[in-house]
Image (cartoon, coloured by chain):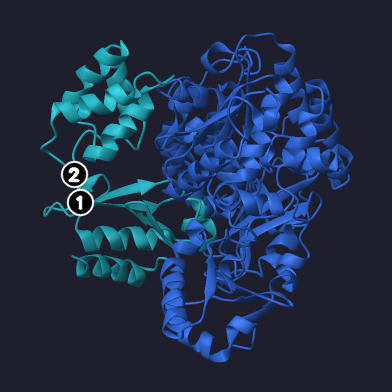
Chain colours: A blue, B cyan
Amino acid sequence: MIKVYVPRDSSALGLGAETVAEAIRAEAGRRDVKIELIRNGSRGLYWLEPMVEVDTPTGRMAYGPVKAKDVPSLFDAGFLEGKVHALGLGVTQDIPYLKTQERLTFARVGITNPVSLEDYLGHEGYRGLRRALSMEPSAIVDEVTESGLRGRGGAAFPTGIKWRTVLNTAADRKYIVCNADEGDSGTFSDRMVMEGDPFVLIEGMTIAGLAVGATQGYIYLRCEYPHAHAALNEAIESACAGGYLGDDILGSGQAFHLEVRLGAGAYVCGEETSLLESLEGKRGMVRFKPPLPAIKGLFGQPTVINNVISLASVPIILDQGGAYYRDFGMGRSRGTLPIQVAGNLKHPGLVEKAFGVTLREILYDYGGGSASGRPIRAVQVGGPLGAYLPESQFDTPLDYEAFASIWAVLGHGGIVAFDDTVDMARMARYGMEFCAVESCGKCTPCRIGSTRGMEVIDKIRAGQDRERNIALLRDLGETMLAGSLCALGGMTPYPVLSALNHFPEDFGVAAADKAA
Amino acid sequence: MANNQWNIEEVSSIVAGLKDKPGALLPILHGIQDHLGYVPPETVPLVARELNLSRAEVHGVIGFYHYFRDTPPGNKTIYICRAEACQAMGSEQLESHAKRRLGIDYHENTPDGEYSLEPVYCLGNCACSPSVMVGTEVHGRVTPERFDEILDEMQAKP
């Protein structure tokens, strides 16, 4: 039977994938053609979504963007045999955007049926877990340490060191918590993995459990992701039924249980200690550190808390070995980064590349330049707490240290491009406003500073006592940077002051006044 | 999905089904809001009693999270993304268009009780900005024209 793929990814659904799938099913029925309709994840070529694929002897052929009204003509043209049509994109794997990527974490996303355990197993799934089951916990941690994996949520802390701390902390009960509260604007790689290959996350968490001696895992998922919620629950159910989760994983005598918990629209709950408070059923107030969550985390027990992409990268590290993963990348940034290309760009999507690719390559070679056709003026990298970069910094390689050296962050790998119609003083004000809306309120620099920041920027924009107010804004930035409890208040100065430093003309001051 | 006629037994059974989970408060509040569309303030004493918390603690948790609401929503809640990627693609115009078309501001319901309008900070649909979510359904590349189409399509459905 001919296999036809229509994504169930929520962005594809948001562009009409469901009606396309229905139209294909109906048209096949009308023509009495037998097809197997598979709802895959997205390949991440979002300007081509809904992208329909057909399995042919020469490989999978892609068509897109497909609307329901295109379906009869696709059948007429013989798309089921991979024949020519105006929407034809050729062999999917050969589309340059995909062909030049290094997909390790995203190896299966868009290819398999996300909720089919059989499909997962048929595509090298659970090989990492099988290997981990034959190893001592300490050796599993060593493998992750050797890979050089650093936390992909944004803080870039070495995953192996975190795991080692939990392993070495004796306790009756330990936890693995997955931070799936992907709240940064311009980021969607966690969502794509959870919707497109949930088993890889489940496998990664199970391996983490074996490595540190934890038997219970929680995925703290933002409630804005209902489709990811459904896919995860479906996959967890099959993993339990298949013996990959539960009291006795694959007959090893080792237990690991997993549950998805929903957040409730608080950005700050992406901060690890606030997330733990929320999981405990409380207001998401940030905790003082120390103690580290690795020593006293969820319900006071040692807890591994990692981002979705960090955990989803673990299966390939265990399967292929830490050295294999480490050999991608540059400097101290090892492996690959799923880069999320968004904002005002012609070809937005998901680009997984080894660290070291430059921002310019991402914006132009992949992103295709601005969607509006106007020059790209500013790019925010790393979410709402990331710095804005001007054109002169576009040749910076995507590498944690290279970004730190220009007072910027890679964060979770989200890239948002703005064309030359952007008002950077307005974006700076938004940065403060966002912090004010989302602050948990525990520390003063964040709770009060963000509101005062908005007011000061309003005065600057209104031309009121500009020089003094700019000095005040810089001073406030210093206070928030140095005095906030967590990254929300502590990093809000990045977008605000980078906007001021790189685009002073938008604040009504001459570029010559630039002072860092 | 607002249900003003909620009864105490329904809420009690939601609480009873979830209260033994570790950290049960958020799952319980989700359970109540899924069922009633909001968390009525009158349910707070019940939840507090069952979890051995003070009413202030429960109230404080409801108030902390943007998603939980203590007043009934319209039949459909429309969320508009205000985050940067959507701003880069013109979400500001979309916001003002939506407010004009619906005749309400954020956190308000239309007088006929049909729609609520809420801001949201990222739907993870950033490659298809601007984004809107209606109920649990995400829509991408929502121009003001597309927004009107979405509303018209919903009104056409019974």
Query: Of the numbered discs in the image, which one, if any, rests on residue A101?
Result: none
Say yes or no: labels 2 and 1 on the same chain. yes
**Chain of the residue on which disc 1 is drawn:** B
Q: Position of residue A353 (x, y in %)?
A: 76, 54
Query: Under tag 2, what secondary structure?
Result: loop
For the residue marked with disc 2, what is the amino acid?
A: Ala
Q: Quadrant of the N terminus of chain A?
A: bottom right
The Cα atoms of the two marked residues, 2 and 1, are separated by 6 Å
- In this orientation, which residue lies closer to the viewer: A51 or A428? A51
Mark 2, other Cα within 10 Å: few <14 / some 14–19 / many ≥20: some
* Contact between labelled residues 1 and 2, with CB atoms less than 8 Å apart: yes
Q: Which residue is mark 1?
A: B75
Q: Which residue shows up at 62% across the image and 55% down it?
A: A379
**Chain of the residue on which disc 2 is drawn:** B
Above or below, A152 relative to B46: below
Q: Position of residue B121 (x, y in %)?
A: 44, 46
Q: Quadrant of the C terminus of chain A?
A: top right
Residue B146's quadrant in the figure? bottom left
Query: Of the numbered discs in the image, which one, if any, rests on residue B2?
Result: 2
User: Left or right: A333 with respect to A224?
Assistant: right
Residue ranking furthest to the bottom: A76
Q: Which residue shows up at 70% across the image and 34% down it?
A: A151
Q: Position of residue A382 (x, y in %)?
A: 62, 45
User: Left or right: A322 with respect to A245?
Assistant: right
For the residue marked with disc 1, what is the amino acid?
A: Asn
